[in-house]
Image: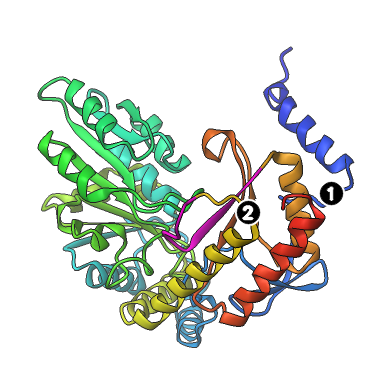
Amino acid sequence: MQDLFSKFDPLIQQREDLLATGLTDPFGLVMEKVLSPTVALCNGRETILLGTYNYMGMTFDPDVIAAGKRALDEFGAGTTGSRVLNGTYAGHREVEDALKDFYGMDHAMVFSTGYQANLGIISTMAGKGDYIVLDIDSHASIWDGCKMGDAEVVPFRHNDIEAMEKRLKRIPEGAGKLVVLEGVYSMMGDIAPLREMIAVAKANGAMVLVDEAHSMGFIGPNGRGVAEDQGVLDQVDFVIGTFSKSVGTVGGFCVSNHPKFEVLRLVCRPYVFTASLPPSVVATAATSIRKLMHGADKRAHLWENSRTLHKGLKDLGFQLGTDAPQSAIISVIMPDLERGAGMWEALLKEGLYVNLARPPATPAGMTLLRCSLCAEHSADQVQTIIERFARAGKVAGII
């Protein structure tokens, strides 16, 4: 009988070969204690965190924590129900109101994770007979939403406006069309040319969904993301986002101005058939979102951190994913998985945690060390990070 695990044998072997060299398991790290948004105890050592999505450092904000504690006391640990049954508490409405205020939009719908937000909205909006045109480097949750919805999927080369336009023009007349883009692509940290892409999409009669998971809170004059920064937010039909990045907790959402949007609460399966977020989580999210509306100083400091780290690593001789800093993500390209894992471990021994990213999650089969900066990283910490990269890079033979 065929072993259903056989298809994973190459990955199992690759992992065993990696660990046989004596390396720490880069995908099995345990944080014994988190001391702040930027420091944790890892393997008993105080470690600077450069591999979390805590872009605005809201996880330890006193107001955010206090809101969560109050909700836990007043509403208990969980809702034990779906949003369409008993799972809508006052806090769920409050966080949706906060999102509507944050984006200046008419409708907001909160999901239990950002993954579910993409899964739910994409699979519900584009079904059999419809077409989804999407960037080849789209997040796994976007691809899974496409697969679940049974629409015809038409990918195009990453950030290629002309390729996107060609795909759109080949779609049969009268068919439903959804263009799916991301503001910031999470592996390389590069941004999309949304202004041009949205213009092409609209000229070809398509609706547009933009995932702003890695830009919300940070990019744009009000932190609304790349679409706001490029002046095209009013042309986006659906903005998808998450609470697990800049908001500092967990959950996902979609905001929209479409007049029929509210019907999705009755037909979107990953919304209807999932228990709602715990009261403490939505309370922390609502408080954090409202504080991010006044986060201009934090955004400015985060941009300064990004520019400093990008220049520092480039000057050391590391190959980076972008020519200039475009977001809070700076990816460092490694020669291969083995040396990438060696560099990751050398950094951990220096007291610095980053993400080791490997295929198939990465574009073009690359191995990356992905650095995610935080607004709470001090200027001194950023200099320390650069110094630790210099020492680890020499130990690992990367520079």
Q: Nearer the viewer, mark 1 or mark 2?
A: 2
Q: Earlier in the sequence, mark 1 or mark 2?
A: 1
Is 36 left, or right, of 273 in this rendering?
Answer: right
Residue 234: percent from left, percent from top: 15, 57
Q: Looking at the picture, which amino acid does disc 2 mark?
A: Phe
Residue 313: percent from left, percent from top: 60, 61
Q: Which mark is residue 239?
A: none
Q: How many marks?
A: 2
Q: Which mark is residue 23?
A: 1
Residue 330: percent from left, percent from top: 53, 58
Q: Which mark is residue 318?
A: 2
Mark 1–mark 2 distance (CA, rounded to whole Å): 22 Å
* Coloring applied to the structure: rainbow
92 or 170: which is nearer to us? 170
**In the figure, residue 90 lies in which quadrant?**
bottom left
393 over 218 or under it: above or below: above
Q: Secondary structure at mark 2?
A: loop
**In the figure, residue 208 lies in which quadrant?**
top left
Residue drawn where x is 79% and y is 52% of the image:
396
Q: Looking at the picture, which amino acid does disc 1 mark?
A: Leu
Label 1 packing within 10 angstroms: few (<14), some (14-19), many (20+): some
Residue 161: percent from left, percent from top: 26, 37
Residue 327 highlighted magenta (yes or no):
yes
Is 199 left, or right, of 272 in this rendering?
Answer: left
Is 204 left, or right, of 197 in this rendering?
Answer: left
384 or 329: which is nearer to us? 384
Please report the bounds of the magenta region as a residue range.
322-334
Viewport quadrant of the N terminus: top right
Residue 128 seen in the current view: yes
Residue drawn where x is 82% and y is 56% of the image:
395
